[in-house]
Amino acid sequence: MKFIINIFFSLFFCFGVATVTSFDAMDSNVYICKGKYSKKYHYSKSCRGLSNCKSSVDKVTLSEAKKIGRTLCGWED
Protein backbone atom coordinates (compact mmCIF):
# COMPACT_ATOMS: atom_id res chain seq x y z
CA MET A 1 0.00 0.00 0.00
CA LYS A 2 2.83 2.38 0.87
CA PHE A 3 4.41 1.61 -2.50
CA ILE A 4 1.23 2.59 -4.35
CA ILE A 5 0.97 5.84 -2.40
CA ASN A 6 4.60 6.69 -3.23
CA ILE A 7 3.98 6.06 -6.92
CA PHE A 8 0.84 8.19 -6.83
CA PHE A 9 2.65 11.14 -5.24
CA SER A 10 5.61 10.76 -7.59
CA LEU A 11 3.35 10.87 -10.64
CA PHE A 12 1.34 13.75 -9.20
CA PHE A 13 4.54 15.73 -8.59
CA CYS A 14 5.89 15.03 -12.10
CA PHE A 15 2.67 16.01 -13.86
CA GLY A 16 2.18 19.00 -11.57
CA VAL A 17 5.64 20.37 -12.36
CA ALA A 18 5.17 19.75 -16.09
CA THR A 19 1.84 21.59 -16.06
CA VAL A 20 3.25 24.60 -14.21
CA THR A 21 6.27 24.70 -16.49
CA SER A 22 4.16 24.58 -19.64
CA PHE A 23 1.95 27.44 -18.45
CA ASP A 24 5.00 29.53 -17.57
CA ALA A 25 6.48 28.87 -21.01
CA MET A 26 3.29 30.08 -22.70
CA ASP A 27 3.64 33.39 -20.85
CA SER A 28 7.23 33.94 -22.00
CA ASN A 29 7.86 36.74 -24.48
CA VAL A 30 8.79 36.21 -28.10
CA TYR A 31 9.30 38.54 -31.06
CA ILE A 32 7.30 38.68 -34.27
CA CYS A 33 7.65 40.67 -37.44
CA LYS A 34 4.43 42.55 -38.19
CA GLY A 35 4.92 42.19 -41.96
CA LYS A 36 2.06 41.04 -44.14
CA TYR A 37 3.58 37.62 -44.94
CA SER A 38 5.36 36.91 -41.63
CA LYS A 39 4.65 33.47 -40.15
CA LYS A 40 7.29 32.87 -37.50
CA TYR A 41 8.08 33.85 -33.91
CA HIS A 42 11.56 34.32 -32.46
CA TYR A 43 12.97 33.95 -28.94
CA SER A 44 15.63 36.60 -29.54
CA LYS A 45 15.11 40.06 -31.00
CA SER A 46 18.50 39.70 -32.69
CA CYS A 47 17.54 36.39 -34.38
CA ARG A 48 18.87 35.99 -37.90
CA GLY A 49 15.33 35.24 -39.07
CA LEU A 50 14.20 38.77 -38.17
CA SER A 51 16.92 40.42 -40.25
CA ASN A 52 14.65 40.59 -43.32
CA CYS A 53 11.74 42.17 -41.49
CA LYS A 54 10.68 45.31 -43.39
CA SER A 55 8.00 46.17 -40.84
CA SER A 56 8.08 46.65 -37.07
CA VAL A 57 9.15 43.92 -34.65
CA ASP A 58 6.76 43.47 -31.73
CA LYS A 59 7.21 41.71 -28.40
CA VAL A 60 4.25 39.39 -27.62
CA THR A 61 3.64 36.37 -25.40
CA LEU A 62 4.24 32.92 -26.83
CA SER A 63 0.55 32.09 -26.48
CA GLU A 64 -0.42 35.21 -28.47
CA ALA A 65 2.05 34.30 -31.22
CA LYS A 66 0.65 30.77 -31.45
CA LYS A 67 -2.92 32.05 -31.38
CA ILE A 68 -2.30 34.07 -34.56
CA GLY A 69 -0.73 31.03 -36.25
CA ARG A 70 2.98 31.74 -35.84
CA THR A 71 5.47 28.87 -35.59
CA LEU A 72 9.04 28.79 -34.29
CA CYS A 73 11.72 30.23 -36.57
CA GLY A 74 13.91 27.63 -38.26
CA TRP A 75 17.08 29.31 -37.03
CA GLU A 76 16.07 28.69 -33.40
CA ASP A 77 15.05 25.01 -33.55
Image (cartoon, rainbow, N blue to C red):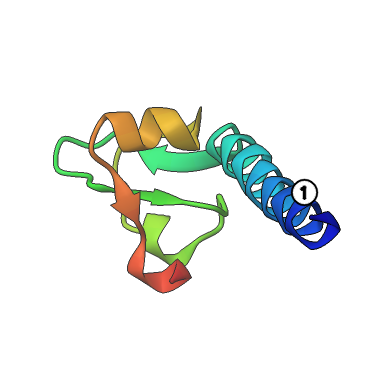
- Could you tell me which quadrant the C terminus lies in? bottom left
Instruction: Name which residue lies at 63% across and 48% down.
Output: 15
- The type of residue carrying mark 1 is Phe
Q: Tell me if residue 66 comes above or below residue 3 in the rendering.
A: above
Front-most of 21 and 77?
21
Task: Tell me which residue sits at (37%, 35%) in the image.
Answer: 65
Q: Which residue lies furthest to the right in this view?
A: 2
Circle 1 residues within 10 Å: few <14, some 14–19, many ≥20: few
Left of 56 or right of it: where is 19? right
Residue 51 seen in render = no
Extreme-left residue of the structure: 37
- On the question of residue 3 being in view, the answer is yes
In this view of the protein, which residue sits in the foreground, 26 or 10? 10
Please provide percent x and percent y for residue 46: 56, 57
Q: Where is residue 18 in the image (x, y as percent from the top left)?
A: 63, 49
Q: Report the residue at 81% width, 56% height from top.
A: 6
Q: State the image quarter where residue 67 is shown.
A: top left
Q: Is residue 9 left or right of residue 50?
A: right
Residue 62: image location, x then y, percent? 48, 37
Q: Name the residue under label 1.
A: 9
Helix, strand or loop at label 1? It is helix
Where the N terminus falls, by quadrant? bottom right
Q: Can you say whether 74 is above or below 36 in the image?
A: below
> How many marks can you see?
1
